[in-house]
Image: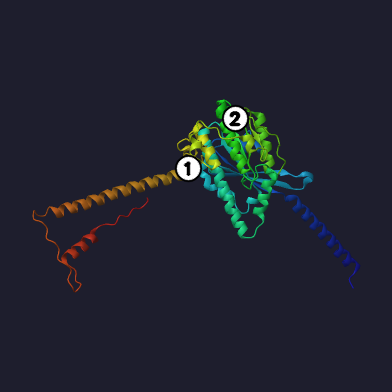
Amino acid sequence: MASPQRATDRKARDIFALALGERNSNAEEKSTGDETTVLVAGSKQAGKSTIIHRFLDRSSEGPKPTLALEYTYGRKSRANDMGKDIVHIWELGGGTASIELMESVATVNSIETMKCVLVLDLSKPAELWGTLKTMLGALKSRVERISSDLISKDSVVPQQLKKKAWEALGEGHPDKDTLDPIPIPIVIVGTKYDLFQDFEPEQRKVICKTLRFVAHMNGASILFASDKDEGMLSRCKRMFNALAFNGASSRSVVLDYDKPLIVPAGTDTLSQIGTPSLLNDELRKQGIRNPIDLWQAAYEQYFPPANGGDTQLPADPCADKTYVEQPVDDMRAQKSEELERYKRQADRRARELAIKHANKASKGSSKSGKPRKPSKPSKPDGSKSKSRRNFGSSAAKAEPVVTEIE
């Protein structure tokens, strides 16, 4: 029979273990929260970093040019100290030249909570269509491939994403039979509105109608912004906050091309957008049936695509003083010097070998004025002919081209 003292000690240990377990359970509950992935992509130097810094309240830090794909994150405390929600922010730099890196962000693990902010430079309409079409096409293709992989594994995620996309548009939308929404939330942000508003009225109208059509067909929202306008920046921050932490988005709607557009997904219609603006009727006579192709042709009548444009590779970042790291730069300079030395040695030895072969050829042709006799065929017993022995000896004298890095 256990003594009263031992029973008391065991009871105390049990109560302590219960309290400790409850504390750990509460700590784990408080530390967990929702996680979201936001991909920010679009035109080069369109203000992607500015939008991210504004959202993270880092406006005092001057944004640096983005190299390839950069990561940052934000956290937001829940009510009643019940943990923190986390947003993983990936910024894709270089315009469409780095489009392949999108696959590193859109994965099987992230697709369920992924959002996209597509930033377009309104001040460069000649590059706008190419960037818009390339980015949306790559994003749609990537999501479809991931969905196919998930469906093959009997996952319900693709169906859930499609259902959410249609819920955002509205199950009873009048254009439901025409739309083909990308099953992740997308916001198209048109930046540098301060420069865009100086365009001719007809040019502004063409750009706004084209953006509205493409966004509507893909189930995306539109928001115009300018880093010169505090109100627009605040509105852009609220939009980003709603995406990052699954908050309620604004339902304000502005469709007037003389004002900054605000078009939440599902609030536009094809009848409100109208038909493409054509400079002439030649496009109608060509019988273009695909609506996207017709809108592209009409847009490019006003704004012919720029040569190269946003598909050009960015400048060499190693020459940019913004990214100076002395130990790395010193090592790179040393390796560059070794590479140049290697190239010079290889060129010198290649020239020496070419001169040696040229001298041998000239000596062989100037031994006599008589034509050279053809060599005799090889003997049946397999013995080598004189000419065969000469060839072997000359080959043995030739020095192999071997270079070393000093």
Q: Is residue 49 visible?
A: no
Mark 1 packing: few (<14 Cα in 10 Å), some, or many (20+)? Answer: some
Between marks 2 and 1, how big is the CA–CA gap?
Answer: 39 Å
Q: Is residue 303 left or right of residue 356?
A: right
**Quadrant location of residue 226?**
top right
- Residue 279 location, x and y as percent? 51, 30
The numbered mark, 2 or 1, whose residue comes first in the sequence reads 2
**Quadrant location of residue 19?**
bottom right
Q: Is residue 171 left or right of residue 350?
A: right
Q: Relative to the observer, which residue lies in front, 163 or 398? A: 163
- Residue 48 location, x and y as percent? 59, 37
Q: Relative to the observer, which residue lies in front, 254 or 196? A: 254
> SS for tag 2?
helix
Q: Are marks 2 and 1 in contact (CB under 8 Å)?
A: no
Q: How many marks?
A: 2
Q: Compared to 46, does 85 lie above or below?
A: below
Viewer-side label of 2, 1: 2
- Residue 246 location, x and y as percent? 70, 44
Q: Compared to 148, does 327 lie above or below?
A: above
- Residue 64 location, x and y as percent? 56, 37
The residue at which mark 1 appears reads as 329
Q: Relative to the observer, which residue lies in front, 339 or 238? A: 238
Amino acid marked by disc 2: Tyr
Amino acid marked by disc 1: Asp
Q: Could you tell me which quadrant the N terminus lies in?
A: bottom right
Q: Is residue 328 visible?
A: yes
Task: Kindly identify which numbered label has been placed on residue 403.
Answer: none
> SS for tag 1?
helix
Q: Compared to 220, does 368 lie above or below?
A: below
Residue occupying image coordinates x 56% and y 49%: 141
The residue at which mark 2 appears reads as 193
